[in-house]
Image (cartoon, rainbow, N blue to C red):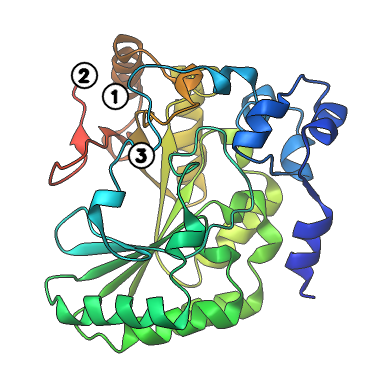
Amino acid sequence: MHNWKTTFKKETVRSPQQLTTITKRATSNQAHQQFPTLAPISFLNTNNPALIKQVLPSKQETKITKGFTTDPLQEQAHTITNGLIQKYQSRALITTTGACAIHCRYCFRRHFNYQEQNPLTPTNLQAITKSLADDKTIQEIILSGGDPLMLDDHKLQQLFNLIHKIKHITTIRIHTRVPTVLPKRITQQLINILKRIKQQLVIVLHINHPDELTTPATTAIQQLHQTTHHILNQSVLLKGINDNPETLIQLSNKLFKHHITPYYLHSLDPVKGTSHFQVPLPKAKQIMQTLRDSLPGYLVPKFVKEVPNLKSKKQIHY
């Protein structure tokens, strides 16, 4: 077994009881049943409330809130074939795997049926490849999930080989949380695979709080810089986690220190079980105005909301 897999297996919490023992915080078995607990011990050992709240199953998740649904982005309606989603012009997204290194309690795909969508079966891969090859308007492939970097190296290489055969695809974008939550996954073998990608490579990290940028995480990100200059970050604005300007200013500055561009700050997607993370819009706009007043423009992420059936993400003005 590879070292990173050993780390993931041995150093990940998978039960509310174990989570309570480590964090001394109450958890909810009912919330765990709806969306299983998964959190790296290293993430919990920071004992940082803003990090722990992101992974703690809470009884608030069982509350029914009007407007919060299982598929708020209507991804099912935009599924071309199993594992392939296209919502926007010129790019398409492959839900490569249901596996993650962490289960964020606000996850917009917490109700997604990965078993049904499994894109990596030979039949589904063939259908995905054909769809992409036939549509010459698609220039960019987004690898999402779950987390694409939880795939074995040989499966990632298989995907890259298939994409490489489609000449009109010029960019591969990888969305991942792995470098900050499972840094040992960023092995030299993985770096070598990413270096061999012929298309432009863009890596989009998901970091919500500056304390997620630990020394192991920044070392992993430094390794990723060998493969591309284009490393971006997107965050979600979350109540009780990063809903104050000081935290987000510190995050932008820390990202910049490690050559990561703040890209998006997302308004929470209204997913069933996540309403307790929602930041009221007037407060969100006030936070964004403070960011704009305090930071150079290139360190202010775009504040956006994903609205079904729009041709792009909706930028929220403040």
- For numbered disc 1, what is the local secondary structure? helix
Check disc 2 and report its element: helix, strand or loop: loop
Residue located at (42% from left, 46% from top): 233
* Residue on which disc 3 sits: 71
Assess whether mark 1 and mark 2 are in contact (beta carbons under 8 angstroms): yes
Farthest residue, direction front? 116
Q: Residue furthest right?
A: 21
Q: Nearer the viewer, residue 210 or 100?
A: 100
Reading the chain from its start, which is encountered first: label 2 or label 1?
A: 1
In the image, what residue occupies the spot 34% across and 28% down?
267
Decide which of 5, 209 is in the foreground and name it. Answer: 5
The picture quadrant where one finds residue 234 is top left
Instruction: State the residue position of label 1.
Output: 292
Q: CA distance from mark 3 to mark 1?
A: 32 Å
Residue type pointed to by label 1: Arg
Q: Is residue 30 above or below residue 142?
A: above
Q: CA distance from mark 2 to mark 1?
A: 10 Å
| Callout 3 amino acid | Asp
Mark 3 or 2 closer to N-term?
3
